[in-house]
């Protein structure tokens, strides 16, 4: 699996993501700076990792969505490339128009830093194929703006077209509409989620619940 991770000023989860991708695929991802204007040739996957790009000023992810590299990410997605955004990366995907909706302040108006349970709503995407349908796994929340919101028409489309990939399974602590934790694009090639599966890929640091996401990706791209 040939992958690349985009780093923005304030990104802080790129190393965790790199460890997860390398552990699953045996290949080290390329690390790209936000001011780069092109992606390496032959990529299978582009990842927008978590953190606090530009200090979360303006709206989370809004400034990062205007970075030079994002034009290349949009082109990559338009050509059918696979893009994964986690936490701040999910916010960027929404701000860039690659996924619908927006991430608002948590309902409690407090930063959430704790584990949560996620239910797999569909297991037929490259991002979720490592899980079985309906499986519940543990991931880590670390966000102040993770309250997913969209208008009624968009929500009906997401639910009707089965574009909700992950849902909070125990408590909807950030207040996301319909307990949505992750969504995919209509062509199933772009996915964003708020919790961090890359935090759970090694038993020495708390378990391997998130590892199937990355092994599933590696297996999917090994067969194409």
Image: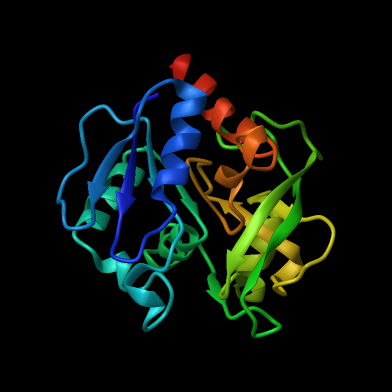
Q: In this view, does 36 lie to the left or right of 30?
A: left
Give the quarter of the figure containing the C terminus: top left
Residue 51: quadrant of the picture: bottom left
State the residue in front, 93 or 160.
93
The answer to whether residue 148 is above or below residue 215 is below
Q: Which colour scheme is used?
A: rainbow
Residue at 74% over, 47% down: 138
State the residue in front, 30 or 66.
30
Residue at 48% over, 14% down: 223
Q: In this view, does 213 lie to the left or right of 99?
A: right
Residue at 52% over, 29% down: 217
Residue 38: quadrant of the picture: top left
State the residue in front, 200 or 133.
200
The answer to whether residue 154 is above or below residue 86 is below
Q: Residue furthest top?
A: 223
Residue 60: quadrant of the picture: bottom left
Q: Is residue 111 left or right of residue 133?
A: left
Badge count: 0
Give the quarter of the figure containing the N terminus: top left
Residue 116: percent from left, percent from top: 74, 57
Q: In this view, does 206 lie to the left or right of 220?
A: right
Residue at 37% over, 60% down: 11
Q: Residue furthest front?
A: 204
Residue 151: percent from left, percent from top: 61, 76
The answer to whether residue 24 is above or below residue 12 is above
Residue 211: percent from left, percent from top: 62, 33
Residue 75: percent from left, percent from top: 26, 47
């Amino acid at each position: 699996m040939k992958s690349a991770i985009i780093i923005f000023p304030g990104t802080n989860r790129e190393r965790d993501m790199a460890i997860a991708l390398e552990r699953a695929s045996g290949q080290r991802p390329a690390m790209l700076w936000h001011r780069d204007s092109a992606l390496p040739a032959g990529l299978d996957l582009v990842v927008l990792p978590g953190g606090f790009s530009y200090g979360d000023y303006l709206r989370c992810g809004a400034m990062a969505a205007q970075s030079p590299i994002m034009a290349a990410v949009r082109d990559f997605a338009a050509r059918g490339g696979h893009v994964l955004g986690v936490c701040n990366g999910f916010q960027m995907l929404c701000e860039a128009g690659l996924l619908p909706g927006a991430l608002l302040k948590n309902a409690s108006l407090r930063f959430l830093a704790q584990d949560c349970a996620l239910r797999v709503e569909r297991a037929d995407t490259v991002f979720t194929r490592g899980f079985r349908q309906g499986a519940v796994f543990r991931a880590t929340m670390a966000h102040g703006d993770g309250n997913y919101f969209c208008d009624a028409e968009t929500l009906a489309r997401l639910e009707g077209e089965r574009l909700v990939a992950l849902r909070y399974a125990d408590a909807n602590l950030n207040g996301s509409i319909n307990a949505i934790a992750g969504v995919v694009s209509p062509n199933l090639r772009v996915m964003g989620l708020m919790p961090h599966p890359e935090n759970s890929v090694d038993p020495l640091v708390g378990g391997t619940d998130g590892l199937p996401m990355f092994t599933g990706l590696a297996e999917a791209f090994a067969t194409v």
